[in-house]
Amino acid sequence: MQRWFLCLLLMTFFSQSAIGQSACKSTFKGEIFCAPPGGSAIPVFDGKIVCAPGRCVLDNMGFLHCSKAQGGGAATDNMGKVFCLDGCIKPSRDYCTEINKGNENGRN
């Protein structure tokens, strides 16, 4: 049941960004995090935002896998196995840029 809820939550908030655009998401606390251009910013179950340089998909176990190529694609086959352009990585906060309030340029 929890896995289905997580999947629905991720699918609801999943960002589909185009190359040259940064996907940005905010936490429940109002913190804003942006992915690199062409990347994904994804809210996860604990309210945090994680990012990746490319697109992300869920595998058949409910885990996120993202392309490590900037703007790269990711897809699952009919068995739920994930394939990513230039290989897959786990999304991380390390790929995000935090946008501070009053500083919309993303520079800290």
Image (cartoon, rainbow, N blue to C red):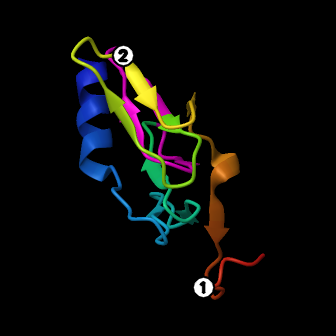
Where residue 107 sits in the image (x, y, percent)? 74, 78
Q: Is residue 52 left or right of residue 14?
A: right
The residue tagged 2 is 81
- Asked whether 41 or 103 is in front, the reply is 41
Does dot 2 land on a helix, a strand or a loop?
Answer: loop
Q: Is residue 33 left or right of residue 41?
A: right
Label 2: few (<14), some (14–19) or many (≥20) C-alpha neighbours in 10 Å: few
Q: Is residue 108 left or right of residue 99?
A: right
Residue depicted at x 53% and y 47%: 48
Does dot 1 land on a helix, a strand or a loop?
Answer: loop
Say the numbered circle drawn on residue 34: none
Where residue 66 sits in the image (x, y, percent)? 49, 37
Q: How many marks?
A: 2
The residue tagged 1 is 104
The mark closer to the camera, 1 or 2, is 2
Pick whichever of labels 1 and 2 is earlier in the sequence: 2
Residue 93 against residue 86 in the figure, above or below: below
Where residue 18 sits in the image (x, y, percent)? 39, 65
Residue 51 against residue 67 in the figure, above or below: below
Quadrant location, the C terminus: bottom right
Kindly give the residue lying farthest to the bottom in the view shown.
102
Residue depicted at x 47% and y 46%: 47
Where residue 1 sits in the image (x, y, percent)? 23, 17
> Which amino acid, mark 1?
Glu
> Which amino acid, mark 2?
Lys
Residue range of the region highlighted in magenta in the rendering: 46-65
Q: Are marks 1 and 2 in contact (CB under 8 Å)?
A: no
Residue 36 against residue 107 in the figure, above or below: above
Residue depicted at x 46% and y 71%: 21
Magenta-colored stretch includes residue 98: no
Residue depicted at x 56% and y 63%: 33
Structural distance between the alpha carbons of marks 1 and 2: 38 Å
